[in-house]
Image: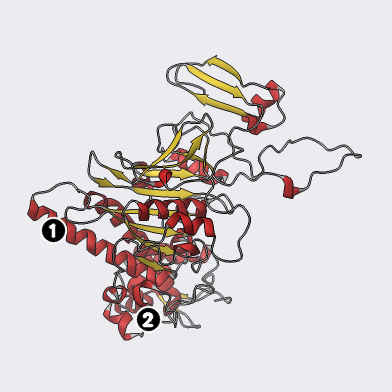
Amino acid sequence: MPEVVEYVLRTPAGGVRRYDHEALCDLLKITDYSRVIFEQGAGREAIVRVYPANPLLAMREISVADLLMDAGGRITLGTYYDGSRLGFRLFDPRTGNAQRGAVFGTTGAGKSRLVQALLVACKRSGIVVHLADLKRGQSVPEAAGQVATRVTTQYETILMLRGLVAEAERRMTVYAEMGRSGFVIGDPDPLVYAIIDEANRLLEKDAPHRDEAALLIKELGRTGRSVGVGIIIAAQAAHLDELGGSDTLRGMLKEGEVILLRWSSAMMQQLVGDGLVPRGEALQPIPKIIGEVRRVRRYNETAPTAEEDPNSQGMLYHLTGRRPTSMARTYLVGSIAACTGYDPLILALYGGKTPPGTPIDLDAYMTAKERAAGRQVGAGGAPATAPAVDELTMVEPEFDAATMSTAQRILAALPPAGMTELELLAVLDADGGRVVRRGTLRTTVSTMRGQGDLARPDGTARIVPAPHT
């Protein structure tokens, strides 16, 4: 039976600064790059292991026991390539803090299955969850009835986040009166999480509630953890700047739980630049197809069928764990084959008990202007019969400057004939939104012209919408 071959390498002081995985495999004459694992240790040592087959290829099914929070506040999501446990912390009993977490990955990388595992873990561990599934409820459909609050639109997500920020503020006041600086589960409040799947839809450029969503998420990440209100987002993104602005998540992620599934090169550069991946470290790429051999096929060879190729769904790096550059993989969550309805294996993981907690009263967090405009939400966070936002076209049915970006307010204010700068400033000053200074207006207008949203000056002093708007 083939054995694992291990090479122990001496490295320069500070470790290997540049690492080319393909070149290493070529040196070892290994055509299946996924069989070779490179890992730097402490001091001046690195290890290269060559496996007979990718060690993360065969994974067992996840169990309820894996997902019960232990005394250290962790659950088990899977395993590293060497068989050690892949833990994920939901609560830190030493500090009394809820966690801030993020799961990033490209389409098909396994985000939604990982979110299902987190949702099951919370329910089984008595943690209250308020869930936003922004793929119209399709990402984690089995979660219906398994969480305290479930919303599926961007507007309802904003209401849910407003409610959670209000709860965090209430707890801060109560705990201060008690003389308590930390959080104790169940005394008197439960541990609570907001989980937002497909968060990129809420935070991407031109999303209708982007600015407020970024502000609320940042506020929860900053103040919620010390009072037992945590937040986890799962998102597709090529760059952190796409998620509500460049500084929205940086501080939140550096001390939270960050999982990176199959990624884009731009996202990797951002994570390295922000210090989430140690400088000088290199992550082995996660291929879409495990065991893919990159070589030229001879003219008389038959190409293998794609259906027979094992997918890398669930392979990841736990960037804020103890082994940020060691490849790991989640256990199997749910059925391998597609189901025609709810996945019975996932439903079995949730169990039949009522989920902990009570729904957030979303109506209570509507502004007077939203209520007057006829905004609607379903009971307990269920989808409204008349959606407030057409999320397919991102059209707002009601002008609400308080939740709009400066660029959106400008486009809403401009008539076809345009306005002078002074006229536009006057309109923005009266629309109910944040104060816009002249310098901010000029910078925003310049950016919008560069993006094609506004017409270029034609010799007049008027600001005019672009023809396509």
Residue positioned 63% across, 26% down in the render: 51
The image shows residue 146, relative to residue 361, as above or below, that is above
- Amino acid marked by disc 2: Gln
The mark nearer the N terminus, 2 or 1, is 1
Residue positioned 41% across, 54% down in the render: 120
User: Residue 247's x, y, as percent?
Assistant: 37, 51
Classify mark 2: residues with Cα within 10 Å, few (<14), some (14-19) or many (20+): many
- Amino acid marked by disc 1: Thr
User: Residue 409's x, y, as percent?
Assistant: 40, 74
Q: Quadrant of the C terminus?
A: bottom right
Q: Secondary structure at mark 2?
A: loop
Residue that sits furthest to the right in the current view: 300
Rendered image quadrant of residue 153: bottom left
Q: Is residue 44 shown left or right of residue 288?
A: left
Identify residue for label 2: 376
Q: CA distance from mark 2 to mark 1?
A: 31 Å
Instruction: Describe the colour scheme in one phrase.
Output: secondary structure
User: Residue 468's x, y, as percent?
Assistant: 58, 75
Can residue 452 be spotted in the picture? yes
Identify residue for label 1: 173
Q: Quadrant of the N terminus?
A: top right
Q: Looking at this view, is 202 or 322 the one in front?
A: 322
Q: Disc 2 vs disc 1: Cβ atoms closer than 8 Å?
A: no
The image shows residue 380, relative to residue 141, as above or below, that is below
Can residue 404 be spotted in the picture? no
Q: Looking at this view, is 310 or 68 the one in front?
A: 68
Q: Secondary structure at mark 1?
A: helix
Q: Is residue 285 shown left or right of residue 413?
A: right
